[in-house]
Amino acid sequence: MVSLMESEAKRSKFITSLSSFLNVAGAEAQACIWIGSLPLSQREKPFHWFNYLFNGVLEDQINQFTPSDQSLFRTEQFGNEFHLLHIHSESDQLDQACTNFLKMIPQPEGQNSKRQILILSEKPLGTKKWLKDKSMETVEYFY
């Protein structure tokens, strides 16, 4: 049964809190592409949600490593791997990085199974070639 909060977040396509984020980043989601309007080191709104999900790894990343246009993370969630790509929206490598990231996400078992990939950005992406892959279901959300 889908909770009222989960269905509301999915219907509105806007994520405004940690709890609404956790509701959409459930067991079905295998990965997320977070297209940030700021560099990771600026800790914009979704940073704290992902830092919570990844047990503080994002904070460690920016404290220990040189800032980059893109960062990859992996964690265990609901007994499965969950992957995250953070990339700055102004990066020249945006499309290529997203394409490469999606290639590394394994196909779930089962003939009719599709990879569920969350796309999180501040504004709509428009039509991107990498979003048209038929082996995945992309769900776009805004913050």
Image (cartoon, rainbow, N blue to C red):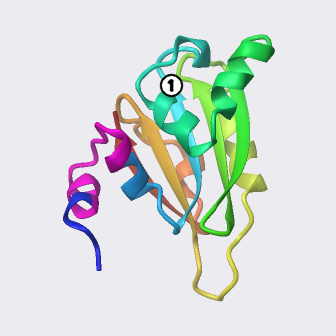
Q: Quadrant of residue 46?
A: top left
The residue at the point 59 percent across, 80 percent down is 113
The residue at the point 71 percent across, 24 percent down is 60
Numbered circles on residues, count: 1
Residue 2's x, y, as percent?
28, 73
> In which quadrant of the rendered image does the C terminus lie?
top left
The residue at the point 59 percent across, 19 percent down is 40
Q: Is residue 40 magenta?
A: no
Q: Quadrant of residue 56?
A: top right
In the displayed image of the protein, which residue is found farthest to the bottom? 111
Of residues 64 and 33, the one nearer the viewer is 64
Q: Is residue 8 magenta?
A: yes
Q: Does the magenta stretch mainly form a helix, a strand or a loop?
A: helix
**Dot 1: what SS?**
strand
Residue 95's x, y, as percent?
63, 34
Residue range highlighted in magenta: 6-20
Question: Which residue corresponds to mark 1?
Answer: 36
Evaluate whether residue 39 shows in this view: yes
Evaluate whether residue 96 shows in this view: no
Q: Quadrant of residue 51?
A: top right
Q: Horizontal placement of 31 versus 72: left or right?
A: left
* Residue type, mark 1 in image: Gly
Neighbour tally class for label 1: few under 14, some 14-19, many 20 plus, Cα within 10 Å: many
Residue 54's x, y, as percent?
63, 42
Q: Horizontal placement of 70 versus 143: left or right?
A: right
Q: Is residue 121 above or below residue 118?
A: above
The residue at the point 50 percent across, 25 percent down is 36
